[in-house]
Amino acid sequence: MKTAFLFPGQGAQTIGMGKDIYDKYEEAKKIYEKAEEISGVEIRKICFEGPEEELIKTENAQLAILTTSLAILKILEEKGIKADIATGLSLGEYTALIYGGFISFEDGIKLIQKRGYYMANNLPNEEYSMAAVIGLESKKIEEICEQIRVEGKFVVPANYNCSSQTAISGASDAIELAIEKLKKAGAKRVIKLKTSGPFHTEKLQDASKLFETELKKINFQTGNNVKIIRNIDGKFYSENDNFKEILAKHIVSPVRFDKAIQLMKAEGIKRFIEIGPGKTLTGFIKKDYPEAELYNINNLETLEKIGEK
């Protein structure tokens, strides 16, 4: 059965994630230890004990989620479970690129440490927020955001999650205005998200430029046979791509997970395995591809259960 691996992004983190897998598997333990050695960050303490205010910091959350997903991935590989395609949401794209062999483990840890730091420390001074819009087509959301922008307030679509859900990002006052207009336009629900930065918008241009200098130090590799879908346009990476340019652009561009779903469907993927904390991505798949077989591997029980299949 054709399989895709899905890797979560920031926001999926929970205290205690990966702990039971770390306790049981020596190979998982090595992943955490190696990531700590490379980064100099107490990833295990942040992941397993928190506190919450430390774990939710962008620079910690990204590193913690990446390491946890890679630890679970290592055990899945040992059990002989492989994917034909891999993708992720925002940060999760890096986990996919490591799995696909385009980025080494060490470079992946270093990059995410820098990415999280630059994203956290190069935010504009204004107050920003995000909201998930459910049950309204993206074209209508784009139109409403554009109307508000014409009035001089900043709000844009940032994450196209699936056909029925798009997250918008912008100045807090513009988000409030957008919520009002979107509900009037027929949105079933609009939920404010616990994210403070205008991620995946042009407002992170400074972070993107700083991160590009880090990307230039990286030696991207040829990759293995796993196809990796990129966020910026929902298409496959190819060996000839300018990875540095794409990944710098990634920070300031909307995530097109909706297009990734359509591509995986067209490629005949029947089984989707989300690797790491949360169940966000399989939730998006379920909405646009209800007949798909969905699995979430985020603890020892789910990891061992899939190993039996």
Image (spheres, rainbow, N blue to C red):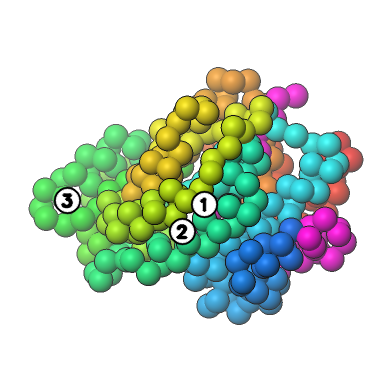
Q: Is residue 119 left or right of residue 260?
A: left
Report if residue 139 is visible in the image.
yes
The percent coordinates of residue 218 (x first, y second) are: 51, 48
Say which element carries label 2: helix
Q: Mark 3 points at which residue?
A: 148
- Please report the bounds of the magenta region as a residue range: 1-30
Which tag is nearer the camera, tag 1 or tag 2? 2
Between residue 286 and residue 252, name the one nearer to us.
Answer: 252
Within-10-Å neighbours for mark 3: few <14, some 14–19, many 20+: some
Three-letter amino acid code at the position of disc 2:
Arg
* 3 and 2 marks in contact (CB < 8 Å): no
Q: Which of marks 3 and 2 is nearer the N terminus?
A: 2
* 1 and 2 marks in contact (CB < 8 Å): yes
Three-letter amino acid code at the position of disc 3:
Ile
Q: Mark 2 points at which residue?
A: 115
Three-letter amino acid code at the position of disc 1:
Leu
Between residue 139 and residue 64, name the one nearer to us.
Answer: 64
Which tag is nearer the camera, tag 3 or tag 2? 2
The percent coordinates of residue 167 (x first, y second) are: 39, 49
The percent coordinates of residue 84 (x first, y second) are: 67, 28
Which tag is nearer the camera, tag 1 or tag 3? 1
- Residue sitting at x 63%, y 20%: 268
Q: Mark 1 points at which residue?
A: 91
